[in-house]
Image: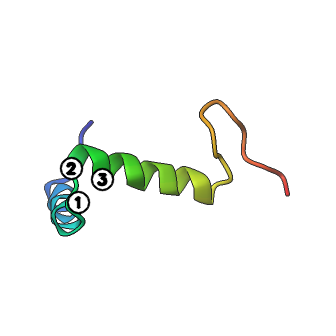
Amino acid sequence: MRVKPEVLETIERLAASELRSVNAQVEILLREALARRGISRLGREPDDG
């Protein structure tokens, strides 16, 4: 995955502050973004509700 250096640095700082690996932090951020769109499981479309 290609990420701008400043974005990666921000994720690295956030991960360190939450005692996580960068990989784990990226996964959490992606899951949160999916949840905000109404996608709770992979392969499921957003809810129309």
Q: Secondary structure at mark 2?
A: helix
Residue 25, numbered label:
3
Residue annotated with mark 2: 22
Whether residues under marks 3 and 2 lie with C-beta atoms below 8 angstroms apart, the answer is yes
Looking at the picture, which amino acid does disc 1 mark?
Ile
Q: Earlier in the sequence, mark 1 or mark 2?
A: 1
Mark 2 is surrounded, within 10 Å at the Cα level, by few (under 14), some (14 to 19) or many (20 or more) other residues, namely some
| Front disc: 1 or 2 | 2
Q: Residue at x 59, y 33 (%)?
A: 42
Give percent across and percent down for residue 37. 64, 55
Looking at the picture, which amino acid does disc 3 mark?
Gln
Q: Residue at x 22, y 60 (%)?
A: 15
Whether residues under marks 3 and 1 lie with C-beta atoms below 8 angstroms apart, the answer is yes
Out of 49 and 19, give the one closest to the viewer: 19
- The quarter in which the N terminus is drawn is top left
Q: Residue at x 51, y 55 (%)?
A: 33
Residue annotated with mark 1: 11
| Front disc: 3 or 1 | 3
Out of 48 and 31, give the one closest to the viewer: 31
Looking at the picture, which amino acid does disc 2 mark?
Val
Q: Could you give the CA–CA distance between mark 1 and mark 2, rounded to whole angstroms?
A: 7 Å
Whether residues under marks 1 and 2 lie with C-beta atoms below 8 angstroms apart, the answer is yes
- The quarter in which the C terminus is drawn is bottom right
- The part of the image, by quadrant, that contains residue 35 is bottom right
Mark 1 is surrounded, within 10 Å at the Cα level, by few (under 14), some (14 to 19) or many (20 or more) other residues, namely some
Q: Earlier in the sequence, mark 3 or mark 1?
A: 1
Q: Secondary structure at mark 3?
A: helix
